[in-house]
Image: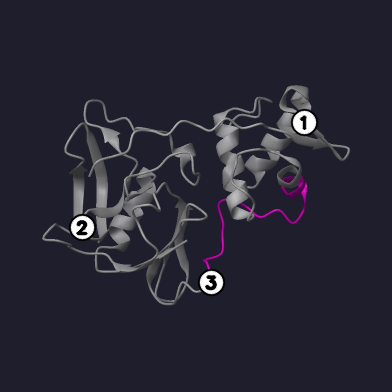
Amino acid sequence: MRILSKLGLAAASITLIAVGTALPADALTVTQAKAAQTRLNKLGCTAGPVDGKIGSMTQAATVRFQSSNRLTQNGSLSGTTYSRLMASTAKRCDIRAVPARSGSGRRIVISQSQNWVWLIDARGKIVRQGGIIDNPRYLRAGNYTSGAKCGRAARIRKNTDGGSLYLNNFVRFAPCGIGFHQIPTYKSNGRQIHADYLLGTNYRASHGCIRVSASMSASIWSFAASSVRVVVMR
């Protein structure tokens, strides 16, 4: 499967609230920036080092917080986002409820609006969940089933894009070439084309497949050893 070239990070104007007043990014104190990073990390959003610098990792963590808390996903710690982040009612990034209307029974649920995936067993228990990278332009909402499609194997340990990349632990679920797989790795050195911290954000786009972490791809590989329903929701 071809992979789209990486999308550049959108420039974000980062602001925080101090005593009820929004502050421009260049007016932030180190203490204020560290407070936001500390809170994001506490909520499982993975902001990285608490260094007072609002870089790409903190912006990605902010997007995960925004998606989990139903806020506009722009990576900006603006008034509303910062207020919700510091509130006692702030929702975690790494533990989320399965979307309503996803059905019941054993299934994999994808939320394109949250950039998130859940593995759910037959009893309705969440086996695992985590961030994804996808591309809603190619993968439509609906119900699918993992397995062989268009004469192609259901699972391939080291699938390839036909070029310089491997799509490890590829699990097919939609015709003809759409499936789950680890973030693509370079054949030459085994490195991923982007970092795990971008999962769960809208800062990258796949060519229809669902990119996940290496460990999540291994979980999905095992979970889909037999056919499983995949529910894709906007």
Is disc 2 surrounded by few (<14), some (14 to 19) or many (20+) residues within 10 Å?
Answer: few
Could you say where residue 39 lies in the image, as x and y percent from the top left?
A: 70, 41
Q: Residue at x 71, y 53 (%)?
A: 90
Badge 2 or badge 3: first in the primary sequence: 3
| Residue type, numbered disc 3 | Ala
Could you say where residue 193 lies in the image, as x and y percent from the top left?
A: 35, 32
Mark 2 or 3, closer to the camera: 2
Query: Of helix, strand and loop, which one carries label 1?
Result: helix
* Residue identified by numbered label 2: 176
Q: Is residue 68 left or right of residue 21?
A: left
Region of the chain picked out in magenta, as a range: 83-99
Q: Residue at x 76, y 42 (%)?
A: 79
The mark found on residue 201 in the picture is none
Mark 2 or 1, closer to the camera: 2
* Residue identified by numbered label 3: 100
- Tell me the chief SS of the magenta region: loop
Judge by depth and name the residue closer to the eye, 141 or 111. 141
| Relative vertical location of residue 208 with respect to residue 103 in this rendering, above or below | above
| Residue type, numbered disc 1 | Gln
